[in-house]
């Protein structure tokens, strides 16, 4: 049976016009720089800014971050009590 080892982290620190330093992204880069398995954001997003501008997408898929992270999944698709829903 085939399998894949990956590590996912949840991070909701990038809100609106945040940056690598005002969010936790620069610290996450340092913390996981030498991780030996593929790493991705299993959940990311912020629900304090409406509509959600998703400015973190450019950072997540930048050359610098993609040296450590392998992308991510937006949290979350359906609207629930957490108010993170896209629809």
Image: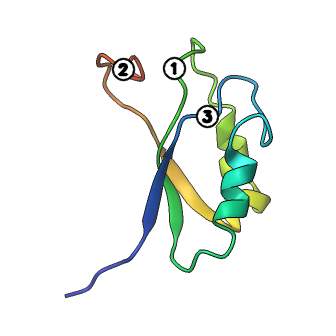
Work out whether residue 42 or residue 33 is closer to the camera in this orientation and state it: 33
Spot occupied by residue 30 in the image (x, y as percentages of width and height): 73, 61
- Rounded to the nearest angstrom, the CA distance separating label 2 from label 3 is 15 Å
45 displayed left or right of 23: left
Task: Using the image, tell me which numbered label, if any, was put on residue 18.
Answer: none
Bin the neighbour count of mark 1 within 10 Å (Cα to Cα): few under 14, some 14-19, many 20 and up.
Answer: some
Location of residue 75 by image quarter:
top left
Q: Quadrant of the C terminus?
A: top left
Residue on which disc 2 sits: 82
Residue drawn at x 68%, y 22% is 16
Spot occupied by residue 43 in the image (x, y as percentages of width and height): 45, 43
- Rounded to the nearest angstrom, the CA distance separating label 3 from label 1 is 10 Å
Mark 1 in CB contact with mark 2 (< 8 angstroms): yes
Residue drawn at x 26%, y 85% is 2
- Rounded to the nearest angstrom, the CA distance separating label 1 from label 2 is 8 Å
Above or below, 49 relative to 75: above
Work out whether residue 57 or residue 8 is closer to the camera in this orientation and state it: 8
Mark 2 in CB contact with mark 3 (< 8 angstroms): no
Spot occupied by residue 9 in the image (x, y as percentages of width and height): 48, 53
Bin the neighbour count of mark 2 within 10 Å (Cα to Cα): few under 14, some 14-19, many 20 and up.
Answer: few
Upstream in sequence: badge 3 or badge 1: 3
In this view, which residue lies farthest toward the top?
50
64 displayed left or right of 5: right
Task: Using the image, tell me which numbered label, if any, was put on residue 47.
Answer: 1
Question: Can residue 61 be seen here?
Answer: no
Which of discs 3 and 1 lies nearer the camera? The answer is 3
Spot occupied by residue 79 in the image (x, y as percentages of width and height): 32, 19
Above or below, 13 relative to 52: below
Residue on which disc 3 sits: 13
| Mark 3, secondary structure of its residue | loop
């Amino acid at each position: 049976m085939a399998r894949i080892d990956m590590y996912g982290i949840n991070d909701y620190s990038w809100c609106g016009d945040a940056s690598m330093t005002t969010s936790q992204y620069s610290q996450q880069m340092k913390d996981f720089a030498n991780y030996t398995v593929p790493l991705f954001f299993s959940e990311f997003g912020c629900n304090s800014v409406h509509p959600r501008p998703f400015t973190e997408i450019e950072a997540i898929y930048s050359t610098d971050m993609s040296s450590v992270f392998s992308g991510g999944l937006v949290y979350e698709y359906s609207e629930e009590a957490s108010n993170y829903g896209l629809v």
